[in-house]
Amino acid sequence: MGDNAKQLYGEYRHALDEKSRLFIPARLRKAFKKGEKLVLSRGLDGCLFLFPQNEWRKLEDKTKTLPITARDARTFTRHLFSGASLCTIDTQGRIPFPSPLREYAEIVKEVVIIGVSNRIEIWAKQKWENYFKNTENKVEDITEKLEEFRI
């Protein structure tokens, strides 16, 4: 994504349309090339991840280095890859939303879409609001711990 990755930020609220497609906000769509393949997958914390294919490949390459003998590595890769779906943004700015991924994220209609650096996260509206409320007062403590990662 190069310099365009700077555009994957912000919080947006939308709803699935009658055919269970999700509108991707214009500001986030600008980060992708026309016709670019994207990967929609189960994420963490109950959300979905939407990666540009090149960023997905980087993650995939990292997971290939995990030992197959490690139970946690197998569990993580199964979680991430088993529900992954290749998609493109249509001319109206929408992506299809497979039923198993909607069920995993508990998305019925309203969603919150957030840009998170190299990916988009898609949350059921109520789940996002609960997550944010429960973590908002922990950010300062977490920030102190991030010094270990040199952030």
Image: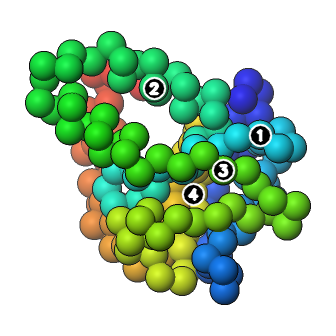
The alpha-carbon separation of the residues under discs 1 and 3 comes to 9 Å
In this rendered view, identify the residue nearer to me: 143 or 95: 95
The alpha-carbon separation of the residues under discs 2 and 1 comes to 18 Å
Give the residue pinned by disc 3: 87
Which residue corresponds to the image point at 63% horizontal and 56% vertical from the top-left?
Answer: 10
Give the residue pinned by disc 4: 114
Q: Identify the element where label 3 is drawn.
A: strand
Q: Nearer the viewer, mark 1 or mark 4?
A: 1
Amino acid marked by disc 3: Cys
- Please indicate whether residue 39 sits to the left or right of residue 106 in the image: right
Visible in this render: residue 64? yes
Q: Identify the element where label 1 is drawn.
A: loop
Q: Going from the N terminus, do you reach mark 2 or mark 3 first?
A: 2
Give the residue pinned by disc 2: 60
Measured as percent of width and height from the top left, residue 25 is found at 74, 62
Give the residue pinned by disc 1: 36
- Residue 94: name its quadrant: bottom right
Amino acid marked by disc 1: Glu
Number of numbered labels in the structure image: 4
The alpha-carbon separation of the residues under discs 4 and 3 comes to 18 Å
The alpha-carbon separation of the residues under discs 1 and 4 comes to 19 Å
Amino acid marked by disc 4: Ile
Which labelled disc corresponds to residue 23? Answer: none
Visible in this render: residue 9? no
The alpha-carbon separation of the residues under discs 2 and 3 comes to 17 Å
